[in-house]
Image (spheres, rainbow, N blue to C red):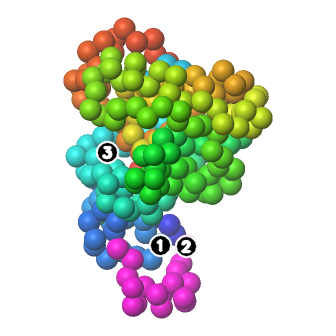
Amino acid sequence: MSQRQPTLSELFLDFFWPNRCPFCGEIIAPQQHCCPDCLASFPPPPDVFVPLLDAAFSFTTYTPEAARAIHLLKFYNQPKLGAVLAKLIFRTFEQELADCRIDCICATPMHPKKQRERGYNQAERMATELARLCQLPCLPLLEKTVQTSAQHTLSAEQRKHNLRGSCRVALPDEVKEKRILVVDDVITTGATMNEAAHALRQAGAAWVGGISFAHPSFEDEYAFSKDIASISTKKIAHTSKA
Ligand SMILES: [Zn+2]
């Protein structure tokens, strides 16, 4: 993917410990993030609809391949995969993110108890790498105050009520009048992003955008969001360059 030539030390390391595609295990060039076949398995995303966000981006559609990548990240103790997903997002939206004049990046928060169980917050791993690539600060602006049910186990209506008031701003001085990008692994109905955006706006954020690795197609979303047509939406059109 990158055109940069590998350094001698990278060639040496690659000889003994070849770089492998994090999704399928194929040997790949030292500078590649994943193999061409896996990259091709991630189709461009549908438009992302999140009412409280000023802009919303997603790298790919929530296909079985994307779901598997996120499953590996979340449940197979592969926090480094978060950096790979962030790199794929960055190479797709580098210009759009620059145009948004973002001040600070943060992750959707995870309740401390759940984070202790998993060992890491996968969204935070993605946010850290995305911020490094964008040369922006990544700060723990949000914190989860209530341990809520896993969103994927609930209906669209239950998702909205499940999260209400569950997240608050931890660093208000870093939020006031700032342009903030929130990172999550998946944007499904947008309930999690809305909750984050609501808290950030209440604390005086000037602009709130959201970005994720995957977003379901309208048909999939409709399956668990029968009332989607009634949701007041702000449509942010974008196309993937992947
Ligand atoms: Zn692969």
- Magenta-drawn segment: 4-20
Precedes in sequence: disc 2 or disc 1? 2
Mark 2–mark 3 contact, CB under 8 Å? no
Left or right: 110 as drawn, with respect to 71: right
- The residues tagged by marks 2 and 1 sit, at their Cα atoms, a distance apart of 7 Å
Which residue does the numbered mark 1 point to in the structure image? 31
Which residue does the numbered mark 3 point to in the structure image? 43
Element on which disc 3 rests: loop
Residue 78 picture location, percent across and down: 38, 62
Total number of numbered labels? 3
Element on which disc 1 rests: loop
- Please name the amino acid that badge 1 sits on: Gln
Q: Residue furthest front?
A: 113
Residue 177 picture location, percent across and down: 76, 28
- The residues tagged by marks 2 and 3 sit, at their Cα atoms, a distance apart of 25 Å
- The residues tagged by marks 3 and 1 sit, at their Cα atoms, a distance apart of 22 Å
Q: Residues within 10 Å of mark 1 (few under 14, many from 20)?
A: some
Residue 100 visible to the viewer: no
Compare residues 12 and 37 and report the one nearer the observer.
Answer: 12
Query: Residue at 75% across / 29% down in the picture?
Result: 176
Query: Residue at 69% across / 25% down in the picture?
Result: 203
Precedes in sequence: disc 3 or disc 1? 1
- Please name the amino acid that badge 2 sits on: Arg
Query: Residue at 37% across / 8% down in the picture?
Result: 230
Query: Residue at 65% across / 49% down in the picture?
Result: 138
- Magenta stretch encompasses residue 17: yes
Which residue does the numbered mark 2 point to in the structure image? 4
Quadrant of residue 103 within the rendered picture: top right
- Ligand 1 - quadrant of the structure image: bottom left
Residue 211 picture location, percent across and down: 50, 39
Residue 73 visible to the viewer: yes
